[in-house]
Image: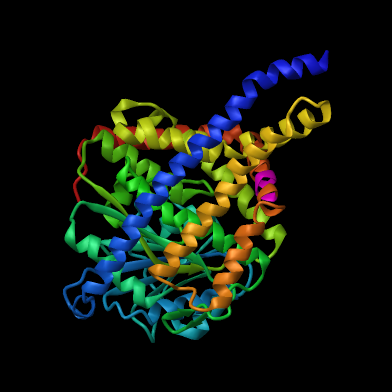
Amino acid sequence: MVREEYLYLSFWLDPFFLSYYFIVNIAYCILLFLGAIATFKRQQELDIEDYTQVIRSNSLPEIAFLVAAYNEAKNILIVTENLLNLTYRSKQIIVINDGSTDNTFDILKEKYELFQVPNTSKVFFTTMQVRGVYRSKIFKEILVVDKKNGQKHDALNAGLNICTSPYFITVDADTSVDNTTFESIIRPMLTDPTTVAVGTSVRIRNGCTTIFNRVGTRLFPLNYISGMQAVEYLRTFLMRPGFDDIGGNWGMSGAFTVFVTDIIVQVGGFAPTFANDLEIILRLQRVLRATKTPYQLVHLTDPVAWTEGPSTRQQLGRQRVVWQRGTLESIWYHKRMLFNPRYGAFGLIIFPFLLLFEAFEPVVELAAYIYIIVGLYLGIVSIPYVALLLIIIWGFIFVFTLFCLLIEESTFRRYTTRRSFLYLLFYSLIENFGYRQLTVFWRIKGFFSFFKRFSAIHRESKDINDVVKKTIKRGKIQW
């Protein structure tokens, strides 16, 4: 009886799994093609244009770097020194000590000779208590906000309260910025006044060297975990420009993204989710489209930021669980955009893609593994079908990654040694045997984490939607 029921089930599941992954792979091919075009065009621009004169200009707008730091004693001086050494002249570095329980604040106070100044910030957002605002005696660019712990979104909102720059960049406390490529991200802001955010490619820093404002990759990757993450990041950020061409981007990295300050203030600041970088982009897309405000969200392929990825399996697992939960939270907050023609191609194509082929992919993949194992045990699923499905799922990923590596090698070529390239090629070969299954497991745990706190998420969703409604009611956004 079980065998007959499973046979009937296979009549529907066989074409479903094949169709699902066929659609996913076709979509990724299109995104890769568009991303490759954008990458090669970007490389030509960088070869032709001279940014030296731009950088030396005294009329450039000030940019603030918001660094949210919680227990970052190991990294905090690395990131602040790196930002200080960037050649961009007009900058402000705002470090938000988010209630660290280690000596993060003491390190900053001693190194930069901090002294307390009056807190004259505008209170755009209510945050956890700010215990003090400090300025450096040595470097006028450095401000430090010391506050009680409220998580990353709260720290960034506290930074926005004190930010006076027209633009700001969210920088993770474990991230280094490469000066060579940083200079080029200014162009979209200067050439198109409707640009509200600029995202860039992020790479894994583990095993790299950071000297002043340069990142070296001679010893990269550090180990198996960092190498696998590097492969994932390379694929992800190469596809991002493709979304710009087919309806709008939905993801810019929280490790390094440039925003127009006034726009983020008007749409309500950062939300209480682990994926606040995804959520704020979805909110921008929602509000700006609903108010018919002309805008551009630009994603550049330049490898500007290098972030410290998890170095152990346990750390990586925790990261992927909260990423998945944060993705589901952000989708739930803005579910009204799903298949909603009011939001154009973003609501009809991009948002459904995010839900069906990004958020729900681990569920479908886990179901496919269970289906194959049970089917083989019952003698219903054929070996040729299993081989075809695995080729579609796994074989494509390897070929896709190989093309990403070749594009990287022929354009930016930031992995300068043969050793680094061969390691990345090897990791892309073995990614499907163990590592991929672990990420599926962790992402499934993210689903359970999401449903475990669903009542709180639903309340947060109402708060965010109230802010969105008020913003939309005011009409077209001006800045």
- Seen in the picture, residue 221 relative to 266 is either above or below; the reply is below
- Please give left or right for residue 154 compared with residue 452 in the image: left
Q: Quadrant of residue 40?
A: bottom left
Q: Give the image location of residue 92, x and y in percent.
A: 33, 72
Instruction: Report whether residue 115 is seen.
Output: no
Would you place residue 290 above or below residue 432 in this image? above
- The overriding secondary structure of the stretch rendered in magenta is helix
Tell me which residue sits at (66%, 35%) in the image: 452
Task: Tell me where residue 62 appears, x and y as whole percent.
Answer: 26, 69
Vertical arrangement, residue 14 with respect to residue 155, above or below: above
Q: Nearer the viewer, residue 262 or 373?
A: 373
Residue toward you, 334 or 386? 386
Question: Percent x, y for residue 109?
Answer: 50, 80
Quadrant in which residue 309 is drawn: bottom right
Name which residue lies at 55% across and 80% down.
107
In the picture as drawn, the residue positioned furthest to the front comes out as 384
Q: Is residue 440 magenta?
A: yes
Q: What is the number of callouts on the image?
A: 0
Give coordinates of residue 357: x percent, y percent.
51, 37
Q: Is residue 296 visible?
A: yes
Q: Where are the magenta residues, as a range? A: 438-442
Is residue 139 positioned above or below 444 on the image? below
Give the camera-side residue of 83 and 151. 83
Q: Nearer the viewer, residue 240 or 59?
A: 240
